[in-house]
Image (spheres, coloured by chain):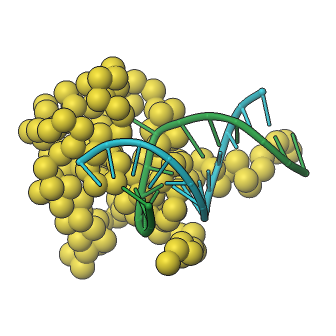
Chain colours: A yellow, B green, C cyan
Amino acid sequence: MGGTHDADDDEVARRKASIIAVVRAIPAGTVASYGWVAAEAGLPGRARLVGRVLGELPAGSGVPWHRVMRAGGRLAFPVGSVDAARQTRALAAEGVRVHGDRVPADVLAGAATLDRLLWGPTAASTTTPKPADTARPRRRT
DNA sequence: AGAGTGACTGCAG
DNA sequence: ACTGCAGCCACTC
């Protein structure tokens, strides 16, 4: 096979797969932040990458992109935009009431609980993505 | 190679 | 609570 098969491309595809796997693992009725998803996918600090990957998702991909929100449980899009309305609608269909551009704290707390659901002691699921990648601490005060 | 941009985030004012 | 700024990462021009 000679050809153009760079390990770099493979790495990129692998990141996308990890991100999508985490998003798909978010239970209906709960939401998670971009940063949280990135961290769980083994890509701490790549919240923006999550947004890009979700934006590339084709319609009907089955990936619950609407369950991914900004930090603090805020809508990913500005209120009034078509996408914002769509996300609000999709969340409402799952019982999540969006108040303005934010969701109740308890819904967001569900994401924190997810941590235990996914990587908890009783998790041990074979469908869980792998952390891989070395965690790189953010240099912040 | 340098500058600009964005489905991000946290701290300051 | 809101806006602005800085840091960061990946991509495009």
- Tell me the residue at 51%/32% (across/down): A56
Q: Note whether A63 is above or below A128 in the view shown.
A: above
Report the front residue among A6 and A30: A30
Question: Residue A95, percent across and down?
Answer: 9, 39
Report the front residue among A53 and A14: A53
Q: Is residue A124 left or right of residue A98?
A: right
Q: Is residue C6 left or right of residue A31?
A: right
Q: Is residue A92 left or right of residue A137?
A: left
Q: Is residue A86 visible?
A: no
Question: Residue A118, percent across and down?
Answer: 28, 65
Question: In the picture, which quadrant includes the N terminus of chain A?
Answer: top right
Q: Is residue A132 left or right of residue A3?
A: left
- Tell me the residue at 23%/65% (across/down): A112
- Tell me the residue at 34%/23% (across/down): A81
Report the front residue among A75 and A46: A75
Report the front residue among A28 and A125: A28
Q: Say which quarter of the image contains residue A72.
A: bottom left
Q: Note whether A88 is above or below A131 in the view shown.
A: above
Question: Residue A136, percent across and down?
Answer: 57, 74
Q: Say which quarter of the image contains residue C11.
A: top right
Q: Is residue A95 visible?
A: yes
